[in-house]
Amino acid sequence: MSESFRGELSQKVDSKARVSIPAAFRRVLEAGDPSCSVPPRPRVVMVYGDERRRFVECYSITEMKRVEALIARLPKGSPNRRLLERNLITLSATVEIDEDGRIVLPPRVRDKIGVTPADLAAGFDAIFAGTLETFQIWKRDVYDSEIAVQSLAAVEQLSGGLDMLALLPDPEA
C-alpha cells in the first residue's frame, strides 16, 4: 500500500452541501482512480450502508474495485454476498471531485451522517478521518462523542500499561 488516508481534518460544509476534500486525501484519490482526467478530477465512492454506523466510508476507485472482486468471489445469492452487495454496493454513491477540490454531499449521505436542514442552512463542520485504505466523513459533534466513547474503551483494552504497539501482529508470523 503506497498511498494511504491518514489524519483527522475538519472541513466546513456550506449551505449547498459542498465540502472540500482535504488536499492529502485528494492526492490518494487521484492515485487510486485509473481514469482520472487532467486536470485531475478523481472520483470517490461513498458508502452509506450499514445502519450501525453514523459515518460515511469513502473509497478510492481502485480500493472499491478490490472490495468488489472479493464480493464477486462469494457464491451468487448467498446470504453473505447479498449482505455485502446491499451495504457496500447498492447503498453507495460515486461522486466526482470538482475543479476546486470539492464534492456535493448527496442527500443520502447527509441523512446518514445526521445533517438536519438547520445544519445545512447554517453550514457545519465535517470531520474527514483517515483509516489507511479508506476515510470516513462524520458530522463534527457525532464524531467527537464517538471518539470519547472509543477513548474509554481503549483505556480498558490497554489496561495494565500495555503499549498500543503490542496490539500489532507479529511481523514474523
Image (tube, rainbow, N blue to C red):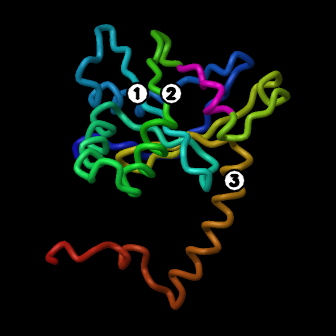
- Residue 22 highlighted magenta (yes or no): no
* Looking at the image, residue 18 lies above or below residue 70: above
Which residue is under mark 2?
A: 21
| Classed neighbour count for the residue bearing mark 1: other residues with Cα under 10 Å, few (<14), some (14–19), many (≥20) | many
Q: Is residue 168 left or right of residue 144?
A: left
> Mark 1 — residue?
26
Secondary structure at badge 1 equals helix
Q: Residues within 10 Å of mark 3 (few under 14, many from 20)?
A: few
Could you tell which of marks 3 and 2 lies nearer the N-terminus? Answer: 2
Q: Earlier in the sequence, mark 1 or mark 3?
A: 1
Please give the name of the residue rendered at 16% of the width and 77% of the height, measured from the top-left corner: 173
Is mark 1 in CB contact (under 8 Å) with mark 2? Answer: yes
Q: Amino acid at mark 2?
A: Ile
Q: Secondary structure at mark 2?
A: loop
Q: Which residue is found at the position 42% from the left and 33% from the top?
A: 25
Residue behind mark 3: 144
Q: Secondary structure at mark 3?
A: helix
- On the image, the x and y values in percent for residue 113 come to 66, 40
Three-letter code, disc 1: Arg
Could you say which is closer to the camera, residue 63 or residue 50? 50
Q: Position of residue 91 (x, y in %)?
A: 52, 37
Q: Residue furthest bottom?
A: 160
Drawn side of residue 96 relative to residue 9, left or right: left
Q: Give the Cα distance between marks 1 and 3.
A: 24 Å
Residue 109 located within the stretch drawn in magenta: yes
- Identified at 29% across, 8% down, the residue is 38
Q: Is residue 87 above or below residue 20?
A: below
Name which residue lies at 26% across and 49% down.
Answer: 70
Magenta residues, as a range? Answer: 103-110
